[in-house]
Every structure is written in C-alpha cells, then in structure tokens.
C-alpha cells in the first residue's frame, strides 16, 4: 500500500519580491524518504528549501504538510510543525559553546524537555558531546556542520531540509557528515538533501530529484540514472536526444 506523502508540493511559484525563481515545482516527500535534490547552480534548490521554510515570497501553488496547507506560513510556525532546516553556510553562534548553541536552538522547547533533547543529539552525534564546552567557532568545519545539523534535529522533526552540507569540508569531514546523515535517516527522519557533490549525494540518497530553471525535470530512483545522464540533465535539461524532458518513476 502506498504511504500518503508527508510533504506534497504542487505548482509552486515563489521567488524574491517581484522575481519568480520557482516556476511550478511539483514534489512529494514520503515518511522516511532520502532525497537528493540536485541541479545546476542557480536552479532554485536553495530557494525551494527556503520557500518550504517560509523565507521567500510565496506566489502560487500548494505546500501541504501532513494534509495542511503551509504555503506562505511563517518560519517559526513551520519550525514547530516538525520540519527542520539546516541552511547553507555556517549558521551557528561561534562565540557560544556547543551546549549553548543547542540551548539556543531548543529555545521553543519547554525547559524540562531540553535535557532529553540534548541527550538525543549527543547520542546521535557523540563528537558533539566530547566538544560540548568548546566554542562553536573553534570546532572544525565538519564538526560545525554536525552542530548545525544537531540544532535542526533537536526537536526531532519528521523531515530535515539540508542545504549543501559538504561545502568547504575536507574529504574526511565530508565522509563523517554523510555518515551522520545516514544515521539520521535510519533514525526515521525523511531527508531532503541539496548537494553539489552529486556522486556522494547519489550514493546516500534513494531518490534523485533534478531541478532546472525552477522546475523539477527528473524524479526517480538514484539507481535509475547514471552520473553521466545527470550531468546531461544539468547542462541541457534532457537525456540523450529526447525532445521531451524525461521524468523517471516517482518513488
Ligand atoms: N535573496 C535573493 N534575492 C534575489 N534573487 C536571489 C536571492 N537569492 C537567490 N536569488 C536568485 O535565485 C536564483 C536561484 O538561486 P538559488 O535558489 O540559490 O539556486 P541554487 O541553490 O540552485 O544554486 C539565482 O538566479 C539567484 O541569483
Ligand atoms: Mg543553493
């Protein structure tokens, strides 16, 4: 039996002020999905994550989360409804300790729950426990990425949106971060990962969604597309000599 999608996006148009970036995006995410959202620079990947999170100008279409339309809702409302986001780039408080950063991220959680939430992320990311009294700004890039991911999953969101976690990291740190993403997924979270390292993304994700010029042009299992085909899709929007932009089977 097909599982109802948690997140269902239809005909989404959004952008920045008068500028439209997303030109009719359709995407569904089912509980426990691991999706790599890929596409050339400027395709609108970050804009899509930010739009789900209520941070852009919502124009038209539907963003349904657990059956409820959240299109155009405010970020704080979305945050409290089981959606977590790890934005691109460094986004911790560098002059605060790891512990304090996690407390900041948990500020909407009731006091008595904070302990349990901290225990949960320390169990997921033991390295953060070892570093808990250090300043976030003194951690390595990979550790900071883990901290930012921990800040997003503190409240156990059902879905985590992650934008380019591997940027600026060493190969070893990238491996650590991707392993942690796999653990998060194994722990029951759906993951929508934007990643420019397409080889890595295709390795960890079960489904690939390709965005180009603000539209989804391919959606299917990562095993159904080769790396070369992915490159072709990025460049031309097509695979081979096909005239119609292909759409793979929806997982
Ligand atoms: N704050 C902004 N204001 C206006 N245009 C923006 C803003 N942020 C991004 N853009 C534009 O939106 C388009 C899509 O950007 P983005 O979503 O960041 O793409 P991607 O993440 O796929 O590389 C680009 O043309 C970019 O210049
Ligand atoms: Mg981006």
Image (cartoon, rainbow, N blue to C red):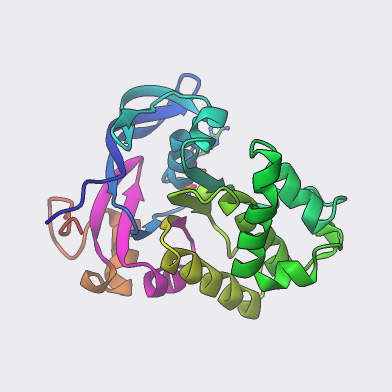
Vertical side of 51 occupied by 122: above or below: below
What residue is drawn where x is 69% and y is 44%?
112
What residue is drawn where x is 52% and y is 46%?
84
Left or right for 79, reference 45: right
Vertical side of 226 occupied by 195: above or below: above
What residue is drawn where x is 43% and y is 50%?
159
What residue is drawn where x is 56% and y is 53%?
153
Question: Is residue 148 something one can see in this rendering?
Answer: no
Q: Is residue 203 magenta?
A: yes
Question: Is residue 184 something one can see in this rendering?
Answer: yes
Name the foreground residue: 197 vs 55.
55
Q: Position of residue 145 (x, y in %)?
A: 66, 61
Q: In the figure, residue 170 lies in which quadrant? A: bottom right
Image quadrant for the C terminus?
Answer: bottom left
Vertical side of 203 occupied by 238: above or below: above
Q: Position of residue 17 (x, y in %)?
A: 50, 20
Name the foreground residue: 61 vs 6.
6
Q: Position of residue 174 (x, y in %)?
A: 59, 73
Name the foreground residue: 146 vs 156.
156
Q: Which residues are magenta?
A: 193-221
């Amino acid at each position: 039996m097909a599982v109802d999608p948690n997140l269902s996006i239809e005909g989404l148009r959004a952008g920045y002020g008068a500028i439209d970036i997303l030109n009719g995006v359709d995407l569904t995410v089912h509980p426990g999905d691991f999706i790599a959202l890929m596409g050339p620079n400027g395709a609108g990947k970050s804009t899509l994550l930010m739009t789900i999170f209520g941070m852009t100008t919502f124009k038209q279409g539907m963003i349904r989360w657990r059956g409820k339309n959240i299109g155009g809702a405010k970020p704080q409302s979305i945050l409290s409804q089981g959606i977590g986001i790890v934005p691109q780039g460094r986004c911790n408080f560098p002059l605060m300790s790891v512990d304090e950063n996690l407390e900041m991220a948990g500020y909407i959680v009731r006091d008595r729950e904070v302990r349990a939430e901290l225990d949960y992320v320390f169990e997921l990311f033991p390295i953060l426990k070892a570093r808990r009294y250090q300043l976030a700004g003194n951690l390595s890039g990979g550790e900071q990425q883990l901290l930012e991911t921990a800040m997003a999953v503190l409240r156990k969101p059902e879905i985590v949106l992650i934008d380019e976690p591997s940027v600026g990291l060493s190969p070893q740190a990238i491996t650590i971060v991707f392993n942690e993403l796999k653990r998060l997924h194994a722990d029951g979270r759906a993951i929508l990962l934007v990643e420019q390292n397409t080889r890595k993304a295709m390795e960890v994700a079960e489904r690939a969604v390709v965005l180009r010029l603000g539209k989804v042009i391919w959606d299917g299992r990562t095993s159904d597309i080769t790396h070369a085909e992915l490159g072709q899709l990025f460049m031309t929007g097509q695979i081979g000599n096909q005239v119609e932009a292909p759409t793979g089977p929806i997982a």
